[in-house]
Image (cartoon, grey):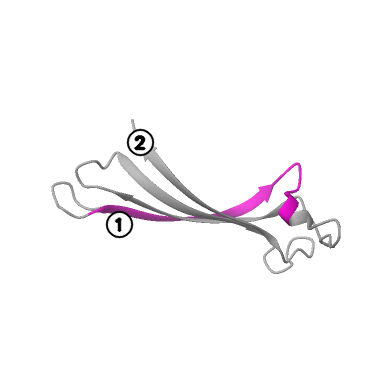
Amino acid sequence: MMASPGTNDVCTTFGLSMGPSYVTRLLQVERGTNALPEKNQSHVLNFFWPELTSALPSRPDREIAIRYMHRSGIFGTFNGVYEGANSLVARYRMRF
């Protein structure tokens, strides 16, 4: 939800993204280790990504964003893959 211009509320947004994800080379975390390799692997998995942004009312063009990125097989839906990869990302965005 965005704050109205001229108020003292912090401008915040929340978004979700989800869909298929294809990689040409599997991530190490998705392959497992040499001692214990993952038995089910897939180049196509599902990607889920919620994001929360925040900006000061005086500078709505400057945002801090926190994004959680999750790539997984949706409980075995994709080629029997139950595992995946996760990342937590923080970033600073300037709009021009």
Q: Which residue in the protein does label 1 denote?
A: 1
Residue 95, quarter of picture = top left
Mark 1: few/some/many CA within 10 Å (<14, 14-19, 20+): few
Residue extending farthest top? 96
Residue 12, image x and y in percent? Answer: 31, 54
Which residue is painted at 74% across and 51% down in the image? 28
Location of the C terminus (image quadrant)? top left
Does 58 sit left or right of 42 as displayed? left
Q: Which amino acid does label 1 sit on?
A: Met
Vertical position of residue 33 compared to residue 61: above or below:
below
Which residue is painted at 71% across and 64% down in the image? 83
Residue 81, image x and y in percent? Answer: 76, 63
- First-in-chain label (2 vs 1): 1
Q: Which amino acid does label 2 sit on?
A: Met
Residue extending farthest front? 35
Residue 19, image x and y in percent? Answer: 60, 54
Residue 36, quarter of picture = bottom right
Task: Label 2: state its secondary structure.
Answer: strand
Q: What stretch is highlighted in magenta?
A: 10-29
Location of the N terminus (image quadrant)? bottom left
Q: Which residue in the protein does label 2 denote?
A: 94
Does 5 sit left or right of 94 as displayed? left
Which one is in front, 3 or 35?
35
Which residue is painted at 17% across and 46% down in the image? 5
